[in-house]
Amino acid sequence: MFFQPIPAKDKITFTNRIGKKKNGIKIRFRNGFCHDVLTSVDIQEIVKAGGRIIKILDGIVYEENFKTPPYRDYILILRDLRNKYKREDNIVGSNCMKLLGNSLYGKSIQKDINTSRHLWSEVTLKANFDSHVIHYEKVNDSQYIVEINEEEKEFDCTPPKST
């Protein structure tokens, strides 16, 4: 299924999975409706948060990053049009070109998320503090929010044995 790059959220009446008619907001594409369009980063974040991907209808796998952005020519055209509309004091045209450019370019430059956040006790933080710890912030007397670099590393979160 092909989805145009600029979806629109519409209030519509639709039939849900059970077969009942409902009113609500859906993302509308030229060829129909879908629940969401996700990048690999979005999928990773959903899974990390405990979510499940039930069904992927279609996808594209890029084995390596592009040498140049895939929509570069279109983005340049939109940039030139935006500048033209700015010079003509056409605010609507300028803002429209800006939004079109953002919709093409935004997800294509999103970086993979290679950090995670944990709620650790002071003992766990001291036991695991090394170069993987990017940042930590004290939440209360005994707990810290710790941001770590997600490389292959095992963390010891077992409480220490009392002697």
Image (cartoon, helix red, strand yellow):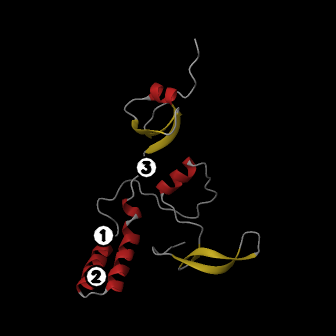
Q: Which residue is found at the position 30% from the left and 69% from the top?
A: 72
Q: Residue furthest top?
A: 163
Disc on the earlier residue, 2 or 3: 2
**What amino acid is found at the position of numbered circle 3 in the picture?**
Ile
Query: Which of 75/9 is in front?
Result: 9
Query: Of the residues tagged 1 and 2, which is closer to the observer?
Result: 2
Q: Which residue is found at the position 60% from the left and 74% from the top?
A: 26
Q: Which residue is found at the position 48% from the left and 59% from the top?
A: 39
Q: How far apart are marks 1 and 3 (CA)?
A: 24 Å
Query: Which of 138/30 is in front?
Result: 138
Q: How far apart are marks 2 and 3 (CA)?
A: 33 Å
**What amino acid is found at the position of numbered circle 2 in the picture?**
Leu
What residue sits right under mark 3 in the picture?
113
- Label 3 residue SS: loop
Q: Which residue is found at the position 42% from the left and 29% from the top?
A: 129
Where does residue 162 sit, x and y in percent of width and height?
59, 15
What residue sits right under mark 2 in the picture?
81
Disc on the earlier residue, 1 or 3: 1
**What amino acid is found at the position of numbered circle 1 in the picture?**
Arg
Q: In this view, does 20 lie to the left or right of 158?
A: right
| Image quarter (top left, top right, bottom left or bottom right) of the C terminus | top right
What residue sits right under mark 1 in the picture?
72
Q: How far apart are marks 1 and 2 (CA)?
A: 14 Å
